[in-house]
Image: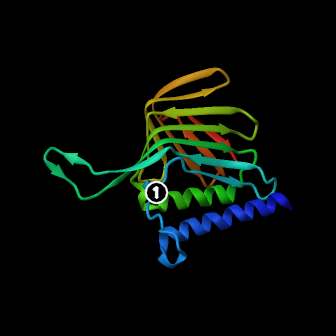
């Protein structure tokens, strides 16, 4: 009961946090934080409803707005650059429906859709308790909603480290799994429970 209360309390504070972004209200007595760049060291965790164990934790050091320059032209668009993105994903405790739902919410969010992540570190534990470490200097969500990692990217598991020019990580909704595409011909499916 205590864990369930803790999960609901965390959800309540997350809802208040996001409402503060969407509908800032000065009468609450605290000036609202309007953009993600106001925060440093942000971390969020999702817990399983069944086991009350964490299955996803995402953190970053800071986010900065960058305006691209091409020669003497400066574009009015700003892009979000997220520094030191860390994700810990444990598929033994993941709720597939919730994880897929969160993935869809993420790829629909415009500020994240055009964001870059520098560097990216993903710790993944599959349902067979195999541990994987994915790392790259740069990452971005592509137009199809896939997380693309490049520049010094590698996958490490069980003392085996392989470097790749590009890694692609995405949800396969039809097969209820996460897919790591190492190159065009080599894919690893991580089944969800």
Q: Horizontal placement of 130 versus 143: left or right?
A: right
Q: Horizontal placement of 183 versus 49: left or right?
A: left
Residue 118 in percent (x, y) is at 43, 39
Residue 171 in percent (x, y) is at 58, 50
Residue 8 in percent (x, y) is at 73, 65
Which residue was labeled with disc 1? 36
Q: Quadrant of the N terminus?
A: bottom right
Which residue is painted at 61% across and 46% down in the image?
178
**Vertical relation: 121 (above or below) 42:** above
**Vertical relation: 43 (above or below) 188:** below
Residue 141 seen by the camera: no
Coloured how? Answer: rainbow
- Quarter of the image where one finds residue 83: top left
Please state which of residues 74 and 97 is positioned toward the viewer in this rendering. Answer: 74
Taking the view exactly as shown, the residue that stands out farthest to the right is 1
What is the count of numbered marks?
A: 1
Residue 16 seen by the camera: yes
Dot 1 alpha-carbon crowd within 10 angstroms: few under 14, some 14 to 19, many 20 or more:
some
Taking the view exactly as shown, the residue that stands out farthest to the top is 159
Secondary element type, mark 1: helix
Residue 166 in percent (x, y) is at 44, 34
Taking the view exactly as shown, the residue that stands out farthest to the left is 72
Please state which of residues 74 and 98 is positioned toward the viewer in this rendering. Answer: 74
Q: Horizontal placement of 193 versus 190: left or right?
A: right
Please state which of residues 81 and 184 is positioned toward the viewer in this rendering. Answer: 81
Which residue is painted at 54% across and 76% down in the image?
28
Taking the view exactly as shown, the residue that stands out farthest to the bottom is 27
Which residue is painted at 50% across and 43% down in the image?
61
């Amino acid at each position: 009961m205590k864990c369930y209360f803790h999960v609901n309390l965390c959800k309540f504070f997350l809802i208040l946090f996001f409402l503060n972004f969407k509908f800032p209200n000065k009468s609450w007595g605290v000036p609202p934080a309007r953009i993600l760049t106001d925060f440093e060291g942000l971390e969020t965790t999702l817990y399983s409803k069944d086991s009350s164990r964490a299955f996803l934790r995402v953190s970053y050091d800071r986010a900065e707005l960058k305006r691209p320059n091409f020669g003497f032209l400066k574009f009015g668009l700003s892009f979000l650059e997220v520094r030191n993105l860390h994700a810990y994903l444990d598929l033994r405790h993941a709720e597939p429906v919730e994880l897929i739902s969160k993935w869809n919410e993420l790829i629909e969010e415009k500020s994240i859709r055009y964001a870059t992540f520098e560097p990216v570190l993903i710790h993944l534990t599959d349902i067979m308790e195999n541990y994987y470490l994915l790392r790259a200097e740069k990452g971005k969500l592509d137009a199809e909603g896939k997380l693309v990692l490049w520049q010094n990217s590698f996958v490490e598991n069980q003392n085996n480290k392989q470097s790749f020019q590009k890694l692609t990580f995405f949800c396969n909704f039809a097969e209820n799994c996460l897919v790591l595409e190492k190159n065009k011909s080599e894919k690893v499916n991580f089944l969800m429970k």
